[in-house]
Amino acid sequence: MMETLRALAEPNRFQIVELLRKGSRPVGDLVDRLGLRQPQVSKHLRVLSDAGLVEVRVDAQRRIYTLRPAPLQELQEWVERYRQLWEGNFQRLDALLGQMKTQEKKRGRRKRQGDHR
């Protein structure tokens, strides 16, 4: 998973993954969309491939890259553990805010009752 995070930390590689999320693409298309030179894109694709995030197939003279979901699934499972932690914190905060609102309403009623006496 750390290799996946390191690979995605670089903005151009992250953008490549985002482009491949929409479907397989040849290197030339990635070059055009990123505005980088072909050797730069190829280096980024090599890092993504080494991290297991993409796979390549050869179609005549073209190399077509496809996103591999397994490393992203592993990353999603890791993030999910933290989402559950935060969700628990938010539920406790929501309960506390509810208690505070209830107490504030009670104070407001007592104050209004005191004004009418």
Image: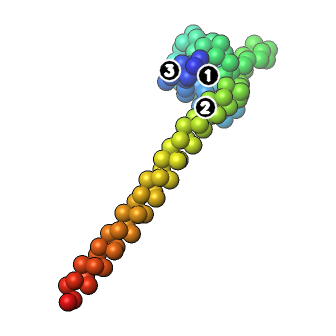
Examine the rendered structure and indicate whether residue 57 appears above or below residue 92. above
Q: Residues within 10 Å of mark 3 (few under 14, many from 20)?
A: few
Q: Which residue has dot 3 on it?
A: 10
x then y, percent, for residue 28: 64, 20
- Gap in angstroms between the C-alphas marked 3 and 1: 15 Å
x then y, percent, for residue 116: 21, 89
Q: Earlier in the sequence, mark 1 or mark 2?
A: 1
Q: Which mark is residue 78?
A: 2
Q: Which residue has dot 1 on it?
A: 1
Query: Which quadrant is home to the N terminus?
Result: top right
Q: Earlier in the sequence, mark 3 or mark 2?
A: 3
Examine the rendered structure and indicate whether residue 96 appears above or below residue 30. below
Query: Which quadrant is home to the C terminus?
Result: bottom left
Q: Earlier in the sequence, mark 3 or mark 1?
A: 1
x then y, percent, for residue 59: 79, 17
Please name the amino acid that badge 2 sits on. Trp
Task: Give the residue displayed 35% in from the left and 68% down from the top.
Answer: 103
Residue 14 falls left or right of residue 100: right
Foreground pick, 2 / 106: 106
Q: Which mark is residue 74?
A: none
- The answer to whether the residue labelled 1 contacts the one labelled 2, judged by CB atoms less than 8 Å apart, is yes
Q: Secondary structure at mark 3?
A: loop
- The answer to whether the residue labelled 3 contacts the one labelled 2, judged by CB atoms less than 8 Å apart, is no
x then y, percent, for residue 115: 20, 85
